[in-house]
Image: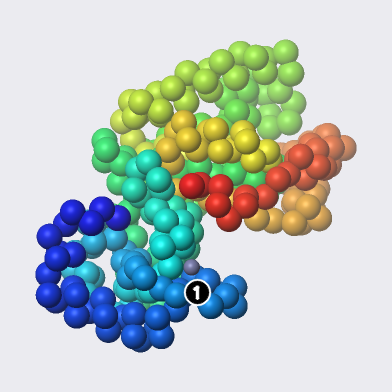
Amino acid sequence: MTMTNPFYKSAKWERKRAAILKRDEYLCQECKRYNKSTEANVVHHIFPLEQYPEYALENWNLISLCHQCHECMHERYTGKLSPLGMQWVDRVSLKYGIDKKKLFKTANGYSVYLVWGSPASGKTTYVKKHRRDEDMVIDLDLIKQSISMQGKTNTGEHLLPVALSIREHLYNMVEHREIPCNVWVVAGLPRLADRARLIKRLKPDEVLFMNVPKEECIQRALNDNERADKELQIRIINKWFNEFEPDPPSLYL
Ligand SMILES: [Zn+2]
């Protein structure tokens, strides 16, 4: 959060800031979650001041943090909330019923969502449930299906380079915010470096990990009539989990 906003120089804020530090016993509330006692020296707006000036002085919207944890709440380059910052937003919005919509507006007014996880982890189901009719979806499997007229798991591998090339073109359009609607990017992305690269490139407004254990993914694939080749399904799920590297807490810095 930029400190140039005149709000931060106001007496109201100085008083509130002191009261919040006192309330939190001058301890970082993020470190506290991990049973660490660190002196707090920043008071953080969970719902950012810029988009939510109406919550600027609400006690529930303010937490004391150490400098290091505060840095982790925001993306270094965009200043937007990091996934850790979003975790606090999620907790507060759930508890107090606050609408998160204003956080997900990009420069052109549309949002980009990245949904990642193992095959059969529920990515498509999630997108189907949350997308609006006019939204766009980028999913390699769907691209393969649309150029082959084949079902979910019967698409010939010979078309993979073509599908990848189409997806690359679409990613470019997302990167330059040329798509005139919200975009859902659906991808496996088990490897940390691949994920970090794509996030850096597409700058999604929200990153959603379908965190489902392997056994459950396999069970879902077995129950899904659209996934005809069960052996292939189990193989690709196993492959994903073999390659899977979870996010370290500081990935997005
Ligand atoms: Zn801390």
Q: Residue at x 84, y 37 (%)?
A: 235
Is residue 110 visible to the viewer in this orientation of the structure?
yes
Q: Nearer the viewer, residue 225 or 249?
A: 249
Q: Tell me which amino acid carries mark 1.
A: Thr
Q: Secondary structure at mark 1?
A: loop
Q: To which quarter of the image does residue 243 belong?
A: top right
Residue 102: % across, % down: 28, 55
Q: Which quadrant would the N terminus be assigned to in this image?
A: bottom left
Q: Nearer the viewer, residue 7 or 235?
A: 7
247 above or below 39?
above
Residue 122: % across, % down: 63, 50
Within 10 angstroms of label 1, few (less than 14), some, or many (20 or more) residues? some
Residue receiving disc 1? 38
141 above or below 125?
above
Residue 69: % across, % down: 46, 62
- Ligand 1 neighbours mark 1 (CB distance < 8 Å): yes
Q: Residue at x 14, y 65 (%)?
A: 9
Q: To which quarter of the image does residue 148 belong?
A: top right
